[in-house]
Image: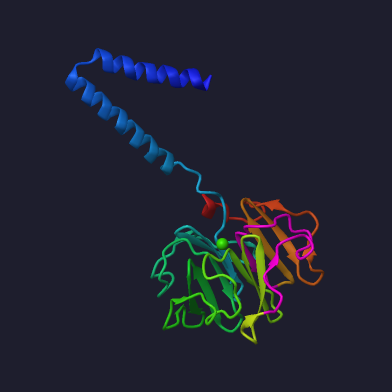
Amino acid sequence: MNNSKTRNIAGNVFAAKKDSGGKTKTSSMMLFILIIIASAVVSQLFAQPGKTLEGAVNWGNGKAYFFKGNRYVRYDIPTDRTDPGYPKFINNENWPGLPWKNGIDTAVNWDNGKVYFFKGNRYIRYDIAADRIDPGYPKFINNETWPGLPWTNSIDAAVNWGNGKAYFFKGNQYVRYDIPADRTDPGYPKFINNENWPGLPWTYGIDAAVNWGNGKAYFFKGNQYVRYDIATDRVDAGYPKFISNETWPGLPALLK
Ligand SMILES: [Ca+2]
């Protein structure tokens, strides 16, 4: 079916060429090229960018932020819904000093009044009280700034576990970072698997993770999420679920 279609299109083009004069031949070829360019542009415009989150962070004041592309939403934790007026754009007005307008890899609240944002091979420290990034950033992700972290770019997700440890995820691996000692714990990276993360349905490519501050953490991948119970150290029953307006009111608007 597809082959014959291709043959017909090719045949028509050939016939058009054969029948046309010189000038018409050139213009029909240009039209052909324009159609190819136009279809490429249209397919880019309508391409599903992937309904996935890029970052999630608990701000520690009853609000959480979710990032995707060049936009973000503020989520109200007590009422469990997206605040009115969101999504908004990531810009210098909304995030003073943030050097990036899109594609945040991950963000993590360090629980000391600072939030770290990561993008590519760099990161920044954001001061919650001052509501702007600290001077001297961005810095590079390396062994001096993040001792023991085995990666220097494109962190998938990071979450503060609330017990002096934070977890960083990249690909099929993760590390546990000791916050007071400011270094990666020995023995890491380890693999993301059912032994290390009981009940987690994914072994690679975590989009985002956030500690909800109530003994639960959420992990997001694609159009799904799981709720992880920190005390029992396993995914709660009934997960994964889909990210929808029922499970995360207002959040799907960010993923469009
Ligand atoms: Ca991410």
Q: Quadrant of residue 195?
A: bottom right
Q: Which residue is drawn at 26% across and 24% down?
A: 28
The magenta stretch spans which residues? 185-213
**Left or right side of 234 for 164:** left
Quarter, ligand 1? bottom right
Q: Quadrant of residue 59?
A: bottom right
Q: Nearer the viewer, residue 196 or 230?
A: 196
Q: Which of 125 and 150 is in front in this view?
A: 150
Q: Does the magenta stretch include residue 205?
A: yes
Residue farthest bottom in this picture: 181
**Residue 113: horizontal and vertical position, in percent?**
56, 83
**Residue 243: horizontal and vertical position, in percent?**
64, 52
Taking the image as drawn, is residue 186 in sight?
A: yes
**Residue 18: horizontal and vertical position, in percent?**
27, 14
**Left or right side of 201 for 51:** left
Q: Quadrant of residue 214?
A: bottom right
**Left or right side of 56 for 218:** right
**Residue 108: horizontal and vertical position, in percent?**
58, 73
Q: In this view, does 7 lie above or below 228?
A: above
The mark total stands at: 0
Residue farthest left in this picture: 23
Taking the image as drawn, is residue 78 in sight?
A: no
Q: Which residue is drawn at 51% across and 70% down?
A: 118
Q: Residue at x 71, y 75 (%)?
A: 187
Q: Does the magenta stretch include residue 119?
A: no
Residue farthest top in this picture: 19
Q: Nearer the viewer, residue 86 or 225?
A: 225
- Secondary structure predominantly adopted by residues drawn in magenta: loop
Q: Residue at x 51, y 22 (%)?
A: 2
